[in-house]
Image: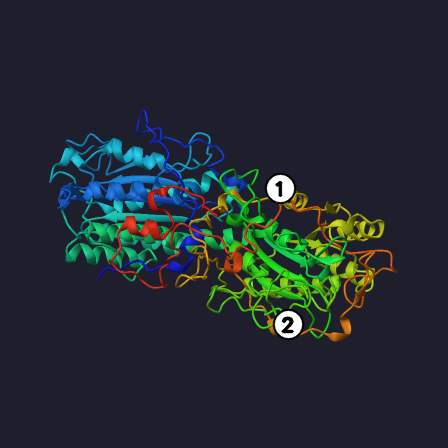
Amino acid sequence: MKRLLGSSWKHIALQLGLLGGIAAAFVIGTREEPAQADDGPDCPDEGDCTFKKPNIMIIMDYSTSMNNVWDMQNNLTRWQVVVSSIKTITQDGSFLSENTHLALMRFGHDPSAAAGTLIPNDTSGITDGQKLDVPWYDAQNTPWYECNGAAIGAALDAAGDPINGSLVGIGTWTKGAMDYTKTLIDAAVAAHPEDMGDRTYLNVVVTDGAWTGMDGTTPLAPAGQNPAITAADLFDNDNVRTYVVAVAGDAAAEMAADGLAVAGGTGPTAIDGDTPALLEMALAALVQDIINDVVAPECTSGLPRIMVLLDASSSMLNIGMGTMAGGVGTTGWDKAREALAGDVDSLFDLGLVNLPNQVVEDVVHLGLSVFGHNAPAPGEQQVLINYGPCMKDNFAWALDPNTSCEMPGCDDPWGGPPIVWTFKDGTQDPPGFDRPTDSHMPKCDGNNLFCSGSGTYTHLGLDLINNNQVSYLAAAQMMGAEFPADANTQFINILITDGQYTGYSTNAQVQTELEQMYNNGTTTYVIGFGDGVDLPAAIAQLQSMADWGSAGALDYYDANNQAALEMALSDIIASISFDPCCAFNDCSENPEPTTIEPDPVPSDESTTDTTATDTTDSTTDPTTDSTTDPTTDSTTDPTTGDTTGGETTDGGTTTSGTDTATDTTADEVGTESGTGDTGGVDTDDGCNCSVPDSDTGNTRGLAGSLLLLGLGGLIRRRRNRG
């Protein structure tokens, strides 16, 4: 009894987006010299990987029974259908080509015990029962062939149909192929002592019939010729698994295939390829199984985690050195939101120097936290979104003033004080995010012209993200964690603040948190954002924080407008190292990698999409942020913007004002705010549809599977966020 290879489909979008565009087919001069893909920026070198690329041997049955017509509608044989499917999953730019070392062997039978025996009428080069068409490495110099998927297709094309389409002439001596594979694996291990036994080897046998003896004429006999003997030896002694894809076999063939799969550690049955559609689905799922078991845990741990800590003090809503509440798109809050998650040049969309076809959101797990006042307990410190992939829409929704502006208490989110914000849980519909996502806004209390009520308790925000990282890492190191992390995972903080913490935090409190995080391996980048950061006292504090967060290695970034903030974020990203072998996420095609259903966000102007986030649950009660402490309402000196009891004071000499009213050119005003877009979530031409976490059975062929994987047409596209 054969099976459909099971898989956790909810991870497919995250793990397979690397399958990019189709390159031109490679042509090989001889079958002894495999074609090689260019070792360029689209071909990640293993030396830059956080994992050792697994070596996969594709072992293909070249018996003449593979010439039987199988796809009646298109008049294609088993061999032709199998070749087409194998070429699809191994072509240049595919996941297997980019992230594994591929080898190809064809097998038939051996007419004689004498060495160097050829099969009569076979011109494809099978000798002594096998032919290694594509090796893993150069036997002379021992380097692995990188990104050699095109060589697989070229070799299959060169081999042609078994004996030019004859229905008789080549048998199925599977054990000979397994024995030869074991010899090749042993040789590869011996030739690469630097692997220290850490490289994974996998076999994939594709066969349509019961195995025979060496002569190809004795099905399932003699017993000593059972390929399961060698498969069991490889699995038990070398930890090499053998997958078996059974193609259109009879009962005896199914039994033999099942036995080989069990012995190879991938049973209890072979993978069902009983029809062309099932074969296509089986091979697509096989790729996913390899990713789940071999590549993804290593890669996910290697993806950097970045936590953005955003100043949510009330001055972020003011302009004119803090003297008045800002209008649409003019406030520091609006501009910070646009720089983090806007349509143009946002943090998520920044290109990467060493990964020219990738952007930040594809190779980083981003989180968002805010800090403000300390009362009422536990204060305004909150993890809005924990570390996770594809979260641009979550950022945009969480920081959009429209999101938290509801009646009663808020007629206009830019109307000035008093504004009563309604803090929301983004997992509720709308928008129905899959991961915990909370909205937040600084307080805008009082009856003055400016917003007040949220102070700059910087040390509390730092303490929050410090503790959150510790708990996140502990959970991510547990068995079965959805997105694993380990001691080698990069953790980075980006602190964006518009003012001094004098009167709210002490130097010692801030220094303790930053140095503790740095000593635990987390560097904190500091960005001073707004007009107030140019004051001497502010400069001193910002540089001190940069020193404490990097052991003196970094300077702070002075960003007094949105463009400068975007440049600072770009510069920070450019300083981070990324694993080119783990760049297989594509948030443009799969903005919600774990969704069960689309998450519609009503909009006055457009259909919107949303993005899932990866988190450990946020423990902060969002309702606490909506309560104002009357004791913190403050008064302001209109000549300085200083506040008392609310936003910052420093002996009446400093201010935390953001961008002034003059910094409101058309290109800097937020394009989403105030336009009627509920939540300001990015638009998408298509449907963020998804597939439940379940076995899809035989209802989908490889074409449908690849669409599900975000690979339809194997063309990489960026989503139109305009």
Extreme residue in the top direction: 29
Return the residue nearer the eye: 196 or 280: 280
Above or below: residue 367 compared with residue 46: below
Q: What residue is shown with label 2?
A: 626
Q: Position of residue 24 (x, y in %)?
A: 35, 31
Q: Secondary structure at mark 1?
A: helix
The vertical placement of 74 against 139, above or below, is below
Q: Residue at x 34, y 46 (%)?
A: 712
Q: Nearer the viewer, mark 1 or mark 2?
A: 2
On screen, 19 above or below 462? above
* Residue 242 in sight: no
Looking at the image, which is closer to me, 38 or 701?
Answer: 701
Answer with mark 1 or mark 2, whichever residue precedes in sequence: 1
Determine whether, in the image, residue 117 is placed left or right of residue 598: left
- Residue pointed to by mark 1: 574
Q: Circle 2 sits in a helix, a strand or a loop, which is it?
A: helix
